Amino acid sequence: MRDILKSHYKSMGRFTIVGVSNTVIDFLVFYFLHDIFDVYFVVAHVCGFMLALFNSFYFNATWTFKQLDKTLWHKQAVSFAAVSVVGLGLSTLTIYMANFFIWVYLAKALATVVSFSWNYCASSLFVFKPQIEQSNSE
């Protein structure tokens, strides 16, 4: 397990940086739409999530994993969105269930760890898996 973590430390660090920037984008968009422009909070939440999702896909594809396939980027984007929505569901379920047992902010922290773990693993395994070059051994 330690070797696996060692081999992923750079991409995990980059993934974390992208995640923090996504959180900032999400909250800023929500704030401006909801508090400044009086947009309904659910609409503001969805807009913030979507902009953060686009940011996340672009930077994770081009910087974190460096696996943007220019011919199939749309399939990668759909896969990435599906992974992110599952992560959102897992974190929502985690915070809901954990809130019965622990302080809500600890539950939120736990939910963040769960979604980070899911999103990183699923993104690296299914969305941005490294291309294996096949050599012609004839």
Image (tube, grey):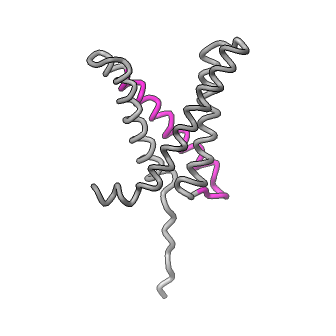
Residue 92 appears in which quarter of the rendering? top left
The answer to which of 135 and 53 lies nearer the viewer is 53
Residue 50, image x, y percentages: 62, 32
Residue 39 appears in which quarter of the rendering? top right
Residue 119 appears in which quarter of the rendering? top left
- Residue 90 located within the stretch drawn in magenta: yes
Residue 130, image x, y percentages: 49, 61
Residue 55, image x, y percentages: 63, 41
| Position of residue 110 in the picture relative to residue 119 (left or right) | left
What is the chief secondary structure element of the magenta stretch?
helix
Residue at 52% across, 39% down? 19
| Position of residue 92 in the picture relative to residue 82 (left or right) | left
| Position of residue 22 in the picture relative to residue 111 (left or right) | right
Residue at 66% across, 58% down? 71
- Residue 5 located within the stretch drawn in magenta: no
Q: Is residue 56 above or below residue 34?
A: below
| Position of residue 108 in the picture relative to residue 66 (left or right) | left
The span picked out in magenta is 68-95
